[in-house]
Amino acid sequence: MCERMRVLAGVLGCALALSLTACGGSSDGPTPTPMVTPPPTPPPPQVVAEGTGLSLEAELIGRVPITTTRTGSLEATVDWTFAANDIDAALVRTNCSVDQFFAGACQVLTISASTTAKPERIRVDSAAAGDYTLFIENTGPGDETLSFQVVLTPSATGAAPPSASARAEVSATLGQKRKPRGSVELR
């Protein structure tokens, strides 16, 4: 009987070893599964500049300096009271003065100079962290009360800024409908 038990134990041991080998098992333990780390979730959108109930007389340009601390999409919305007035908006890189803007010394990223859009919306994707200036022009015919909001939607990764040729195409439209007679800081 002992002999039979030894034979039976040997057969069971071989069967167990064969079944582990057939399933990919080994005496070293299971093969580890690699851990995949998901990409970080970007922070939620944040308002980086806003103003409400601001006066902007006809033929003036308002200037709003903006600073961001993250790369992402910048979207500005400018709205006003009277649809008869034409309001335009531009976003430029750096803290740029009105004189620098009209001298062509500012990196213009985007302009919305529609005569019919209300509100005006402009957007720049892949905007690097840093300084920007929002220009709001009231070409009239009348004085206006306006509001604006600039929202940064952070991105997980950065991308290249707009090309120089794209900037050159939009730089000539603001201030061309009617020559501005001055500027104001909007805060």
Image (cartoon, rainbow, N blue to C red):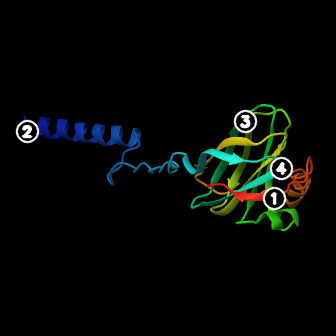
Could you tell me if residue 153 is visible in this image? yes
Q: Earlier in the sequence, mark 1 or mark 4?
A: 4
Amino acid type at circle 1 is: Gly
Mark pair 4, 3: CA separation: 18 Å
Number of the label disc, if any, that sits on residue 119 = 3
Where is residue 162? Give x, y as percent. Answer: 79, 56
Q: Are marks 1 and 4 in contact (CB under 8 Å)?
A: yes
Say which residue label 4 marks.
59
Residue lying at 37% horizontally and 45% vertically, measured from the top left: 25
Q: Is residue 178 left or right of residue 21?
A: right
Say which residue label 2 marks.
2
Q: Is residue 129 left or right of residue 163?
A: left
Q: Is residue 104 above or below residue 72?
A: below
Mark pair 2, 3: CA separation: 95 Å
Mark pair 3, 1: CA separation: 23 Å
Q: Earlier in the sequence, mark 3 or mark 1?
A: 3
Q: Earlier in the sequence, mark 4 or mark 3?
A: 4
Could you tell me if residue 106 is visible in this image? no
Q: Residues within 10 Å of mark 1 (few under 14, many from 20)?
A: few
Where is residue 58? Give x, y as percent. Answer: 80, 46
Q: Earlier in the sequence, mark 1 or mark 2?
A: 2
Residue lying at 51% horizontally and 45% vertically, measured from the top left: 44
Q: Nearer the viewer, residue 102 or 169?
A: 102
Say which residue label 1 marks.
182
Of helix, strand and loop, which one carries label 2? helix
